Amino acid sequence: MTRYAPDDIPALPVEAIRDALGRADLDAAAALLEAHDRAVRLALAGDVLLDPRQAQRWANLQQEQQALLEELTRLRDQTGEQLRQLQRHQRGALAYLRSGG
């Protein structure tokens, strides 16, 4: 795995994540975010001291990552709700067909 220095912030793969989200491939988007999170944790492992400029860059990265995680969570929640609605409609249609409708 790649080692990063406090000035060498792992690039957040925003385009790849947005592409995965656009294809509704939530698992791929989550995998990209998890891989990035591992890289960030590795970069900051140990006793890393950051100066204010470095700390701000890392804080900005965290905000970007958090926004993408929130978007992924929102899309997963929407997908789950759509699946529940589809299942309810399917049960209703099956009940209708069984009743001779």
Image: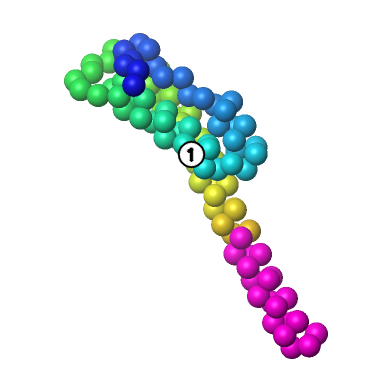
Residue under label 1: 30
Q: For residue 56, say whether it is visible.
A: no
Q: Amino acid at mark 1?
A: Ala
Q: How many marks?
A: 1
Q: Is residue 4 visible?
A: yes
Type of secondary structure dominating the magenta stretch: helix
Q: Is residue 74 left or right of residue 5?
A: right
Residue pictured at 80% horizontal, 85% vertical = 101
Q: Is residue 93 above or below residue 33?
A: below
User: Which residue lies at the image location 59% right of the left edge and 41% below the top edge?
Assistant: 25
Q: Is residue 88 left or right of residue 93?
A: left
Report the front residue among 38 and 81.
38
Q: Is residue 100 left or right of residue 94?
A: right
In the rendering, at what x and y percent does residue 52 appear? 32, 14
Residue at the farthest right position: 101
Say left or right for 61 vs 4. right
What segment carries the magenta color? 83-101
Residue 12: percent from the left, percent from the top? Answer: 48, 24
